[in-house]
Image: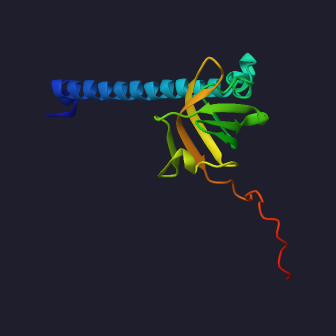
């Protein structure tokens, strides 16, 4: 078979069509990758510049709610300032006092240890989660006694002089 007849044969035509289809598929694949990259890049840049473009707050729209003066109706974090039977008075955020009602269903925990109401004492730092009532009290469901913050000292109850150095 000579070269002239090979170029006119069906085999050569099939090879050319196969190469053309393969090249077209590669071009389409690369075009798809290029378009996908451009879309992803646009989406990334759009989200990065959203606040600048639409004049929204830099911290997000919920930042104002985070620092607002909403009342802690379902819980409080603070220090026990008074124990009175089945109720506690807690000094919470901004020195606001909250009355906490205790019930038989109230769970009191310190780390993994379960406590009783009698184990609570003044100056304990606690987190209370419960249900508010119409009088503004919180009926405690869970009280978590927190360890004292680092660097804090317990209140001094003994006024004995320090030994000489």
Q: Is 163 positioned to the left or the right of 24 in the image?
A: right
Q: Quadrant of the N terminus?
A: top left
Determine which quarter of the picture holds residue 79. top right
Measured from the top left, where is residue 71 in percent x and y? 69, 24
Asked if residue 93 is positioned above or below residue 137 in the image, the reply reads below
Q: Quadrant of the C terminus?
A: bottom right
The total of numbered circles placed on residues is: 0
Q: Residue at x 61, y 49 (%)?
A: 146
Q: Residue at x 55, y 34 (%)?
A: 102
Q: Residue at x 21, y 33 (%)?
A: 3
Asked if residue 86 is positioned above or below residue 27 in the image, the reply reads below
Measured from the top left, where is residue 51 in percent x and y? 71, 23
Q: Residue at x 59, y 36 (%)?
A: 128
Determine which quarter of the picture holds residue 73. top right
Q: Residue furthest front?
A: 85
Pick the residue in front: 39 or 81: 81
Q: Residue furthest bottom?
A: 165
- What colouring method underlies this structural image? rainbow
Q: Is 102 positioned to the left or the right of 77 in the image?
A: left
Pick the residue in front: 143 or 1: 143
Measured from the top left, where is residue 12 in percent x and y? 21, 28
Measured from the top left, where is residue 76 in percent x and y? 64, 34
């Amino acid at each position: 078979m000579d070269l002239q007849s090979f170029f006119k044969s069906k085999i050569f035509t099939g090879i050319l069509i196969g190469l053309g289809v393969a090249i077209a598929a590669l071009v389409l694949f690369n075009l798809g990758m290029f378009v996908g990259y451009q879309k992803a890049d646009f989406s990334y840049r759009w989200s990065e510049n959203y606040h600048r473009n639409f004049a929204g707050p830099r911290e997000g729209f919920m930042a104002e709610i985070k620092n607002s003066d909403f009342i802690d109706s379902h819980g409080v974090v603070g220090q026990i300032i008074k124990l009175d039977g089945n109720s506690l008075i807690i000094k919470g955020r901004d020195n606001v006092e909250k009355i906490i009602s205790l019930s038989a269903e109230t769970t009191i925990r310190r780390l993994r240890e379960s406590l009783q109401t009698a184990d609570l004492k003044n100056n304990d730092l606690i987190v209370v989660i419960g249900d508010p009532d119409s009088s503004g009290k919180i009926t405690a469901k869970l009280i978590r006694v927190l360890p004292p913050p680092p660097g804090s000292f317990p209140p001094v109850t003994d006024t004995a002089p320090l030994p000489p150095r």
